Image (cartoon, rainbow, N blue to C red):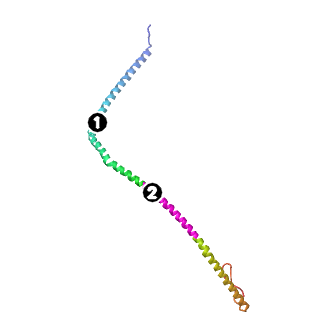
Amino acid sequence: MEVSLSPVAQWSLLIIAVFNVLLFGGLVAFVILGVKELQKLRGQAEKVMDQVKPILAEAKPVVASINPILNNNVKPILGNVQEITHKVSDIVTDLGQHAHEIAETGEHTVKEITHRVEATGQVVTDTVSKPVISIAGMIAGVSRALSVLKNYQGSANGDRRETVHANGDGATAAASK
């Protein structure tokens, strides 16, 4: 049995085959170009590596000398810095505690002095001011009583003096004759 394809199917297969061959050729060309670019990049990398090798040769002794410098110079300094930092921290803590204690002592002292001043003021008021006020009031009352008595005796003897009376506001006023 013979199988035959129509001319359109044959042309379609031919177009697909040509397209696949072109695609394969493009992929091969891409791979070839990629390999060439990688070779260029490798050449540049080799140039850089050739320049880096002397630098590495110079850097190795420098790097090797850094470790003793660190061990001999930097580590003791870091130890001293840590010790000093610890001492400063302790001093700051002590100062803070002392400042707090001084503030509390000052506050307590001010309260105590205030209480004593108030108590002293109360004692002065109770023991000095009140008796002085009472005595002054008594003297003023006796003085006024004597003044009234003199005026009373003078008016009984016919001697007419002007009577002076104290107003409620402390001012004096002459009585009418």
- In the displayed structure, 59 sits above or below 174; it is above
Q: Residue at x 45, y 57 (%)?
A: 94
Q: Residue at x 53, y 63 (%)?
A: 108
Secondary structure category for the residue under label 1 = helix
Label 1 or label 2, whichever lies nearer to me, is: 2
Residue 47, by quadrant, is: top left
Residue 111, by quadrant, is: bottom right
Secondary structure category for the residue under label 2 = helix
Q: Which residues are magenta?
A: 90-119
Which three-letter amino acid code belongs to the residue tagged 1? Met
Locate residue 126, reporting x and y percent.
62, 73
Q: Is residue 164 magenta?
A: no
Examine the rendering and report whether any part of residue 108 can be seen: yes
Which three-letter amino acid code belongs to the residue tagged 2? Asp
- In the displayed structure, 4 sits above or below 166; it is above
Locate residue 74, reporting x and y percent.
33, 48
**Towards the viewer: 161 or 54:** 161
**How many marks overall?**
2
Residue 49 shows which numbered tag? 1
Quarter of the figure that contains the C terminus = bottom right
Q: Residue at x 46, y 59 (%)?
A: 98
Mark 2 sits on what residue?
94
Examine the rendering and report whether any part of residue 171 can be seen: no
- In the displayed structure, 176 sits above or below 116; it is below
Left or right for 88, reference 143? left
**Towards the viewer: 125 or 3:** 125
Left or right for 38, reference 3? left
Q: Is residue 95 magenta?
A: yes
Q: CA distance from mark 1 to mark 2?
A: 60 Å
